[in-house]
Amino acid sequence: MALIETVNISQKYDDREVLKNINLKIDKAEVFTLIGPTGAGKTTLIRILDLLESPCSGRFLFDGVDVISSRANQLEARRRMSYVQQRPLVFAMDVFDNVACGLRWRHMKSTATKRKTEEALELVGMTAYINRNARTLSGGETQRVAIARALVTEPEVLFLDEPTANMDPISTAKIEEVLAHIINEQRIAIIMTTHNMSQGQRMASKLGVLINGELLQTGSVNDIFNVPTSREVAEFVGIENILQGEVAEADNELASIRVDGETVRAISNYAVGGKVYLLIRPETIVFSLSHEAGSARNVFKCKVNQINTIGSVVRIEVECGFNLLGVITTEAARDLNISIGKEIYASFKATAVHVIPRW
Ligand SMILES: Nc1ncnc2c1ncn2[C@@H]1O[C@H](COP(=O)(O)OP(=O)(O)OP(=O)(O)O)[C@@H](O)[C@H]1O
Ligand SMILES: [Mg+2]
């Protein structure tokens, strides 16, 4: 049985629907990351799952028990959860007391409180700060104290809303290290939100993409980043070539798809006449100066329209009947002696094209 299950949860603020029919299942000890653009409804959803607010409709089962209609069930479930909010607050007292307060509220004996608080601080690597006034800590240290405070009550599920928002790369890496350590040491479910796409990829066992209040896709990191099921998710995960096409021929799994008068070969099961989007990651496109007889099914003569060098990579926009964006290394760009207006060949494999329906 799933630890968390929502059925058609919706939320409205002043008649504006910010969550639409959210159906979600999260298992015990699963690490689930919610990604989505700003304003998508991530914080709203995480607050509903943490029982800080009630949805306007839908069902929410925690460990199989309905926690919306019964106040008693809600309180019981609440004790099994902890929440670290987007910008955690700490009290103007020392780090020890900031973490211990959760246990004192539960009337735990002082020896057990001391032991558990020390263990929680150890887990987040903050033992050395135990006597420091928490208000004097950096953003990353404050976050670690907030995580220790959330863990000290031994929850079965830990909610983290943007745990590394506005943090520098070193503090972000430290928090991720702490979370990875928690994931290994404690069998708890972790449900977090992030804007940070690479963090989503690194940390999650399962991802959900929330866009404009709709949970458009859930799946493994590979599913979401390489096999998006909609144009919106493809755009959000950075698949920059999204071509509109129509299936012209279908031969077993290899299809010919018309795109702006050109034919692109792709692996697809859609029937002739089917309207589709073709998704192609820029880094899968190979550029060359001649029509090489390589293994790629798709080779197009094209003209370079734009060149942008960003660090060690060069982004090249070409026109080959349709527009394509490729990303190559600066060395490869130098070898091609690439310049605007130059004619080159762009090639990509049929398997590099992911085909999804266009409604
Ligand atoms: N209490 C509220 N009253 C009215 N509108 C709200 C309230 N809380 C959130 N909203 C609106 O609901 C939408 C979703 O907000 P939410 O904070 O859940 O987004 P988010 O995905 O967490 O964004 P971010 O990535 O910026 O944190 C936004 O348009 C926001 O303005
Ligand atoms: Mg938010």
Image: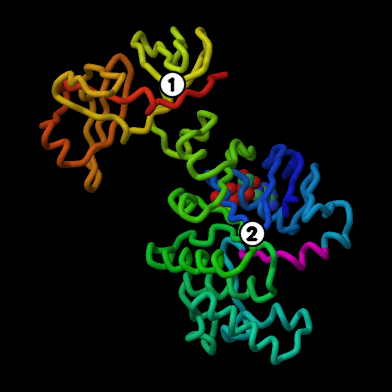
Residue 185, above or below 278: below
**Residue 1's spot in the image, x, y percent?**
75, 50
Label 2 and label 1: CA atoms lie apart by: 36 Å
**Residue 160's spot in the image, x, y percent?**
59, 61
Report if the CB atoms under discs 2 and 1 are less than 8 Å apart.
no
**Residue 50's spot in the image, x, y percent?**
71, 58
Among the 4 quarters of the image, the one containing residue 208? top right
Residue 285 vs residue 254, the one in the foreground: 254
Residue 166, above or below 358: below
Residue 78, above or below 69: below
What residue is rendered at 25% in x and 31% in y?
316
- The three-letter code of the residue at mark 1 reads Ile
Residue 293, above or below 127: above
Name, please, the residue furthest toward the bottom. 111
Judge from the rendering whether residue 12 lies leftward or rightward of residue 68; answer left or right: left
Which quarter of the figure is the C terminus placed in?
top right
Label 2, residues with CA under 10 Å away: few <14, some 14-19, many ≥20: some
Magenta residue span: 75-84
What residue is rendered at 30% in x and 19% in y?
298
Which residue is label 2 attached to?
29
Q: What element carries label 1?
A: strand
Among the 4 quarters of the image, the one containing residue 335? top left
Which residue is label 1 attached to?
267
Q: Is residue 12 on the magenta stretch?
A: no
Q: Which badge, 2 or 1, comes first in the chain's sequence? A: 2
- The three-letter code of the residue at mark 2 reads Ala
